[in-house]
Image (cartoon, helix red, strand yellow):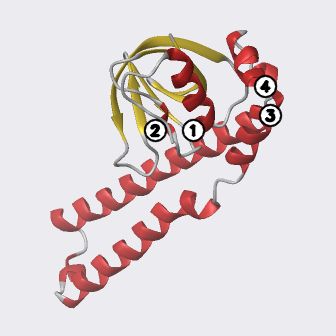
Amino acid sequence: MFKKKDSSAEERNVRLMHHLDFTADDLAINRQGKLSERQYQYFDRVMKSASPLWMFLPLIIMVFGGGLILIQLNNEGFLERVGSPEFNILVVGLGGSFGLYAVFMFYAIYSGRKRSKMTPDQYEVRIMSGKVRGINTDMSTPIVKLGRYRLFSYQGGIGDAFVKGQHYTVYGIKSAGNMHYLLSAEAD
């Protein structure tokens, strides 16, 4: 449908809007450093639909895996040596894993609640500019490398939206580190 190589800025802008699902109105609002109402509704829905199973899956795996380890160790007579250095290392390792999980869960729940109470005006839309250095579509959520930034989108078309080596201005919400959720973009 779209020609990627040697396309004009106008053709690349049409491709961006098509694959990333944003409108000219969204782009105009993002240029002002704001989130459009349409983008807010989508972003809010995505944030609230994060399955609780994904939050508790590591705990389920740790409990199940820890149980299997303890059953195997009991069959080998290892648990009869309670208080031995090997047993203490196992207890500290399992306790440390659960402790790290608890810290991670607290942070995830806190930041999720904080973000779910935000209004469109409270989101800081960042304006980034640079040349596309790489497009990684091997992951479930593809990533575009723009200068020093890494951009992702749940829309699914991010890998087809950009042309490597071309210069873009993008608008996004900071996620973590140099990762940003991509809202809209335009070819320079």
**Mark 2–mark 1 contact, CB under 8 Å?**
yes
CA gap, disc 1 to disc 4?
18 Å
CA gap, disc 2 to disc 1?
7 Å
Name the amino acid, label 4: Ser
- Residue located beneath label 3 in the image: 38
CA gap, disc 4 to disc 3?
5 Å
Looking at the image, tell me whether mark 4 or mark 2 is earlier in sequence order: 4
Q: Secondary structure at mark 2?
A: helix
Looking at the image, tell me whether mark 1 or mark 4 is earlier in sequence order: 1
Q: Position of residue 73 (x, y in %)?
A: 22, 81
Q: Give neighbour class at mark 4: few <14, some 14-19, many 20+ (Cα, 10 Å).
A: many
**Mark 4–mark 2 contact, CB under 8 Å?**
no
* Camera-side residue of 31 and 4: 4
- Residue located beneath label 1 in the image: 19
- Residue 169 visible in this rendered orientation of the protein: no
CA gap, disc 1 to disc 3?
16 Å
Q: Secondary structure at mark 4?
A: loop
- Residue located beneath label 4 in the image: 36
Q: Secondary structure at mark 1?
A: helix
CA gap, disc 2 to disc 3?
22 Å
Q: Residue at x 73, y 9 (%)?
A: 32
Q: Residue at x 72, y 34 (%)?
A: 114
Q: Secondary structure at mark 3?
A: helix
- Whether 33 is drawn above or below 37: the answer is above
